[in-house]
Image (cartoon, rainbow, N blue to C red):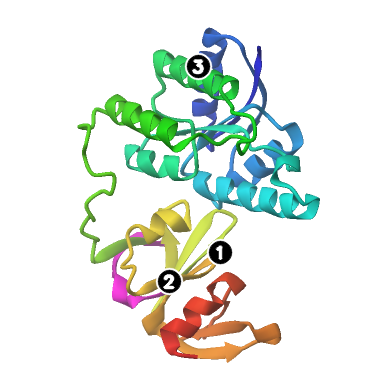
Amino acid sequence: MTLSALIIDDEQLAREELKYLLGQVGGVEVVAEGANGIEAVELIEEHHPDLVFLDVQMPGLDGFAVIERLMDRRAKAAAAAGSASEAEPLPQIVFATAYDQYAVRAFDVNAVDYLLKPFDLTRVEQAVERVRGRIASALPGSTPGSLPESQVESQLDALLRLLNRPQGASRTPEPAKLPSKLIVQAQSRLLLVDQAEICFAAIDEGVIRVVTQGFEGQSKCRTLEELLEQLDPAVFWRAHRGFVVNINHIREVVPWFKSSYQLRMNDKKQTEIPVSRAQTRRLRELFNL
């Protein structure tokens, strides 16, 4: 059986390399390629592939966010149809990235495998065979694309071995010490900025803007998720899909229509930032609203 596949990666050379290796493996037809998370969602819904090779770190919408969005849409479709079995099944997912720290989290969103860059022919072949095995062993009545917990555990153990990690090691990584300063590019200068000075960060068309009370610049991070990994979670809060705010720089909470809110920050422009409905409860917890 020939598998239909998508390759989603913001690096053209990575897409070309993976497509070449899949040609060497055989039995996989690459039906389309995409360069970002938004394209990933659209291409998956258009082509309904068996398999998606999905980069983790991409501008705007990272690989994990793509899966979350697909699962959310599937849940809504199932609710409308009255049955999860009638909703379009999710494709098999193989994450691909240069960073192995995402490996365990990949299984939280039910990925079948995980490839590290630069790609290796043997590992690509193994990933394809896992996908074939997973499709062939799908149990009647199970959620499409899901595996029994025992099989997930088995795959996780195999993945840890592939990444040269000791078996039995904790699945929760030790918390890394966060940097007290971040690099922010302002014109041709690279400035070291104390986290406490940052009012908020916003993403627009894949570019992350970092705003302090004195200036604004750009982060080298490609997604807000990547930026949040460097920030103190006790201080920085993702109030909206496109915004991360420093709660110590919120000047005013402004009631908005239909029980929603906006945050007026204490930067020079007193920027107003929307609070998503999903984060309204968190806002009330933070300020006892």
Q: Earlier in the sequence, mark 1 or mark 3?
A: 3
The location of residue 253, given as percent across then percent down, is: 52, 89
Q: Earlier in the sequence, mark 2 or mark 3?
A: 3
Q: Is residue 232 above or below residue 251?
A: above
Q: Amino acid at mark 1?
A: Arg
Q: In whole angstroms, how far apart are the C-alphas of marks 1 and 3?
A: 36 Å
Quadrant of the rendering where the N terminus is positioned:
top right
On the picture, is 101 further left or further right than 167?
A: right
| Disc 1: which residue | 241
With respect to residue 55, does 241 lie above or below? Answer: below
- Image coordinates of residue 47 in percent, x first then y, are 73, 32
Residue 91 belongs to the span the image colors magenta: no
Residue beneath disc 2: 237
Where is residue 205, by image quadrant? bottom right
Give, as a single range, the part of the protein colored magenta: 185-200
Residue at the spot x=61%, y=11% of the render?
27
SS for callout 2: strand
Q: Taking the image as drawn, is residue 268 in sight?
A: no
Q: State the image coordinates of residue 82 (x, y, percent, origin top left).
A: 77, 52
Of 93 and 217, nearer the camera is 93
Q: Is residue 64 above or below residue 253?
A: above
| Left or right of 254, for residue 89 | right
Question: Which mark, by number, is residue 268?
Answer: none
- Circle 3 residue: 129
Residue 210 visible? The answer is: yes
Disc 3 secondary structure class: helix
